[in-house]
Amino acid sequence: MPEPRKRRPAAMVAIRSLMLTSSDSIGSESPYSARPPSLVQLPLKIIALIVSYIDTPADLARVCSTCRVLNYMAVPLLYETLVLSTGEESPHNQKLPTGGRGSAFATGLNSLVRGSLGPMVHSLTLRGVWKEDTIQRHSNDFVMDRLTILNIAVRAALDKTTRLQQFSWELDIRMLDTVYLGLANLKISELHLRFPSTRGTQPVTVVPVMPHLVALSVTNIDPTLNQDDISTLLCSKKLQDLRMQWSPRMVDSKKPCVRLHDYFKKSTGSSRLRIKKLAFQNLHTEATDDLYQAIDQERIEEVTILNSSSCTFSMIFHNPSANSRHPSPIAQPGFKVMRHDKISRAHCDFLGSMMGLEQIYFVNHDARYYIERPSASPPAIFRRGSVDHDMDTIRVLPNGTSHPSPTFADDPKTQSYLKDNYFTTILSNHGQWLTHLLLSATWHLSTSMIARLVHTCPNLVQLGYATETSSFDTMTLLIPFLRNLVAIRLLVPIYPPNSNSGPPKPVKANTHGLLVPLRSRPLCEVVELDESVHIEKIGLTLGDNEAWGHLKLIGLGWKSYELGEIYAEPLIGSRPPSLPGTPTAQPRVTRRTSTPAGKPLQSTLGKRTRELRSTSNSSLNENSNGVPSVHIQNMDKEMEDAPQETERFVWRRRVRPVGWDVLKHWSIWAMDGSEM
């Protein structure tokens, strides 16, 4: 469920420290003055609360220039999160790059060092391209080390930011020990480091322990570039969130050049990592027991493995040196969330060795890109693409050499066998605990598989899947029986190469010139339709409050819609509004006090069916567009004599399209991406 916007306690503390203490309200006007009441006449606490809900920096800057009181309130919020970028070209002169005395990067550092804004900053990010001067440029003069000067300036700025909690170094140059020591003296809780992609001449720096560090993210790790040593930093006592991303060059090299012992050599014995969230990306290494010896498995709650060896999960929870298979699944009391992007036999075996997971996510693609760019053409994987079914990314031979493991055969029987193993393992070992489930788009669920899913996973709250049948028919079968389901995402099926079943053929008009109804169309065609058609169809299909009222969000491919309240729309004339390209629906006659009439669900689950709420003289029919309609047959004379007891209307659901600003709060969208 989307969480409500939280107040910023750090910003509120900074605001209170700058509040005027002379009175509880501002305004010297007489109560008999002719001026209208002003915002500044409110109590300062009310003004501070109103200003705290302004997020856009441009709006905060305008508020700061309004009056003295609002300036006091908005300035701490404006400088609470500070991002300084360098390396961009100047908008005034495209030939001269920024980075000089008048650049925004240098001006921002100078404001922190010389001004009084340092205590207001709680999050500082330095990003961009920093170019070193070449020796040829100073061949006849003194060669200035800009890297050292930059680190000195950053250290001076850190000494002024006494309340800094988050620091992010995203520059493409090295951070020296002077900045590391400055961060160790502060109460830094979140740290993000990006190592440079080039080899530097500076010696290796041992990053010190930060006693207040809770979350650590290190990206672009390349052991061949002589980068800084973070083994001591990993021993921070309060560390709970660790994310490590190796350079993509590790994937291209196809060699296990990453030695986990170099990073976790000090995290053994009594210094084991007590982290709750762990994420690895582009990790290709030999199967060792370094992770098993360095991590306390009982405290892990969430694990994310992206583009890495399929045996990484087993290296975390199982001792590779023992080389023993567990006869029965092991229940880790804290391990609840798993996120993975590669389908392999090793990963399926790991799922079978565990039980009790509550959230499982199979990453398909970066959903945010196509959600934020609705005009972009659909990706190739939606139509027909390849799927990586490797058993293991790298296999190490006894003599120490390595080679890529044999890829999964393109035989459809092999792929279907692996899909069935995954599906059976998920339902049998984790079904009764699952609340969030995002399946692979290469798994096209049949009607019987969906019935098993509904029967085995009754506690699902968010669900994403692809189906080989009609999408709307699938929702009709699934949603009414999952009473806790609030978000559903229908994935466009992916068809691997050399598969027997390919993408469905385009729908053609029938002999009467009418298109096939939406209920019978595949999702790859439905998602291409205009949003007005989606809104009309979803509003009519999900108009029953008893069956669909708990559903809040629905996704069709890369389009998503938020569902609102259910309302009754009176019919104008003898026909209700119809969908474009589909026959019109007949009018629906419903009692004023009744809920929407619906067709009993023909379920294979053995559960109850929904009872009709229309009159006993009404018979349900279904047009070619799939919209239920009621034909009046043999109306009693009493109904004709008392027309005031009935009303002609149709039940609808308010539907509106939503973007990433809403979807980022829902796990089945937020977790479907290449970012850790």
Image: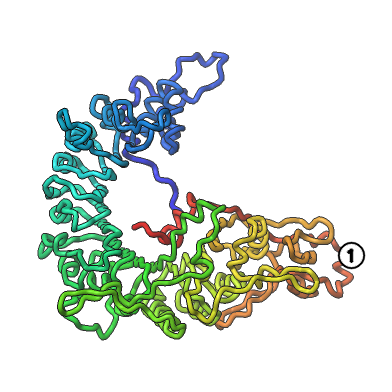
Q: Position of residue 429 (x, y in %)?
A: 36, 78
Q: Which residue is mark 1?
A: 641
Quarter of the rendering containing residue 348:
bottom left
User: In the displayed structure, would residue 106 be above or below residue 282?
Assistant: above
Q: Position of residue 552 (x, y in %)?
A: 54, 59
Left or right of 618? Residue 220 is left
**Nearest the eye: 188 or 610:** 188
Crowdedness near tag 1: few (<14), some (14–19) or many (≥20) residues, C-alpha within 10 Å: few
Q: Amino acid at mark 1?
A: Asp
**Nearest the eye: 519 or 194:** 194
Residue at (15, 29) in percent of width and height: 142
User: In the displayed structure, would residue 617 be above or below residue 74?
Assistant: below
Q: Position of residue 297 (x, y in %)?
A: 22, 68
**Nearest the eye: 35 or 486:** 486
Q: Secondary structure at mark 1?
A: helix
Left or right of 586? Residue 129 is left
Left or right of 121? Residue 671 is right
Q: How is the image coloured?
A: rainbow
Residue at (20, 78) in percent of width and height: 397
Which quarter of the figure is the C terminus placed in? bottom left
Quarter of the rendering containing residue 480:
bottom right
Residue at (58, 67) in percent of width and height: 524
Is there any visible trace of residue 159 in the rendered image?
no
Q: Position of residue 594 (x, y in %)?
A: 70, 64
